[in-house]
């Protein structure tokens, strides 16, 4: 497709988004702001959350099943909105699917490029920090040893229950970050799409227990910008729609329980699939 044709073609179909649970609501908020004319079908695999404690082959199988389900509902592009699923499945999905696939990446590059002589803490699920894709990304940093990987099992489960306040989160942070008590921390990377919902709690806890600026980084805005570029490049941008129904919510879990939490995190109403 030529650049000129990409500029003149439009596609009103929705964009598919999936995550192991509610995490992608953090990225979806950015996509809704950046792409006001687009519609989205969100699938949260809440029944199987969190992916981060599962073996790689199981994460791949769950990711492929989620992608197939969204493709059958006619999406024009797919966002893999889970760092763990990205690390385990993105290559296979891009080989298999006929639509563009956009992934999330932990924001360790901007954190490392910000400078300083302190450490960078990478908070993620246990699986993400072990998978080859993340290890390769970390190895490309100017000083990989400066990045300290912290597997934070337990945080996703809290967020899935809507528990994002400081008092709920602080005990898990204390347990996982105790080895770095008093360290000089330049940056903290939120390496799971669930974690931006607890960014204020992470920042508060870090400033009480570390020295240094403790700047918070997440990859949500970059993912939204990449999706916008991919849509234009492939002639898939939607025509103007105004302020209609924009997000359809699907879950593998209990919808009556999941929907209110998702709407609270996303901060906009969601709709039944049509």
Image (cartoon, rainbow, N blue to C red):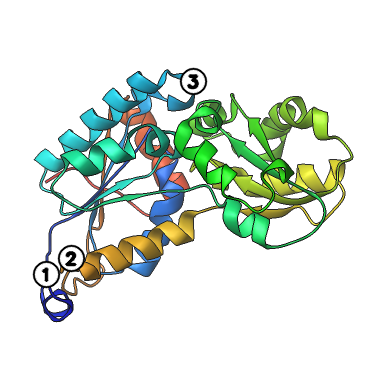
* Residue 33 visible in the picture: yes
The quadrant holding residue 55 is top left
Q: Are marks 1 and 2 in contact (CB under 8 Å)?
A: yes
**Nearer mark to the viewer, of 1 and 2:** 1
User: Which residue is pictured at 31% across the width and 68% down the height?
Assistant: 229
Q: Are marks 1 and 3 in contact (CB under 8 Å)?
A: no
Residue 267 visible in the current orientation: no
Q: Find residue 1 and name its label.
A: 1
Residue positioned 81% across, 28% down in the render: 179
Spatial separation of the CA atoms under disc 1 and disc 3? 41 Å
Quadrant containing the N terminus is bottom left
User: Is residue 134 shown left or right of residue 119?
Assistant: left
> Percent x, y for residue 237?
19, 68
Mark number displayed over residue 53: 3
Task: Calculate the distance from the C-alpha at mark 1 to the C-alpha at mark 2.
Answer: 7 Å
Looking at the rendered structure, the secondary structure element under dot 3 is helix
Q: Nearer the viewer, mark 3 or mark 2?
A: 2
Mark on residue 234?
A: 2
Along the horizontal axis of the image, is 32 left or right of 168? left
Q: Position of residue 42 (x, y in %)?
A: 28, 44
Q: Earlier in the sequence, mark 1 or mark 3?
A: 1
Residue at image position (14%, 81%) is 4
Which residue is nearer to you in this view: 58 or 209?
58
Determine whether the residue tagged by mark 1 lies in a helix, strand or loop: loop
């Amino acid at each position: 497709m030529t650049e000129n044709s990409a500029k003149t073609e439009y596609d009103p179909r929705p964009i598919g988004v999936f995550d192991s649970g509610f995490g992608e609501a953090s990225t979806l908020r950015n996509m809704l702001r950046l792409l006001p004319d687009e519609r989205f079908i969100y699938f949260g695999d809440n029944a199987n959350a969190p992916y981060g404690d599962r073996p790689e082959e199981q994460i791949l199988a769950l990711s492929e099943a989620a992608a197939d389900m969204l493709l059958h509902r006619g999406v024009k592009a797919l966002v893999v909105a889970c760092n763990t699923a990205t690390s385990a499945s993105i290559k296979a999905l891009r080989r298999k699917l006929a639509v563009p696939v956009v992934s999330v990446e932990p924001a360790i590059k901007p954190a490392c490029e910000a400078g300083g002589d302190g450490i960078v803490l990478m908070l993620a699920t246990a699986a993400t920090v072990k998978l080859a894709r993340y290890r390769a990304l970390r190895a490309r940093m100017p000083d990989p040893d400066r990045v300290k990987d912290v597997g934070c099992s337990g945080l996703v489960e809290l967020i899935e229950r809507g528990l994002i306040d400081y008092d709920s989160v602080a005990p898990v942070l204390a347990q996982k970050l105790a080895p770095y008590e008093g360290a000089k921390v330049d940056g903290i990377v939120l390496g799971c799409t669930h974690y931006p919902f607890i960014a204020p709690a992470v920042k508060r806890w870090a400033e009480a227990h570390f020295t240094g600026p403790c700047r918070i980084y997440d990859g949500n805005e970059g993912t939204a910008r990449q999706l916008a570029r991919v849509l234009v490049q492939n002639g898939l941008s939607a025509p103007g729609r105004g302020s209609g129904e924009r997000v359809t919510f699907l879950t593998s879990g209990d919808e009556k329980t999941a929907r209110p939490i998702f709407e609270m995190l996303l901060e906009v109403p969601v709709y039944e699939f049509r």
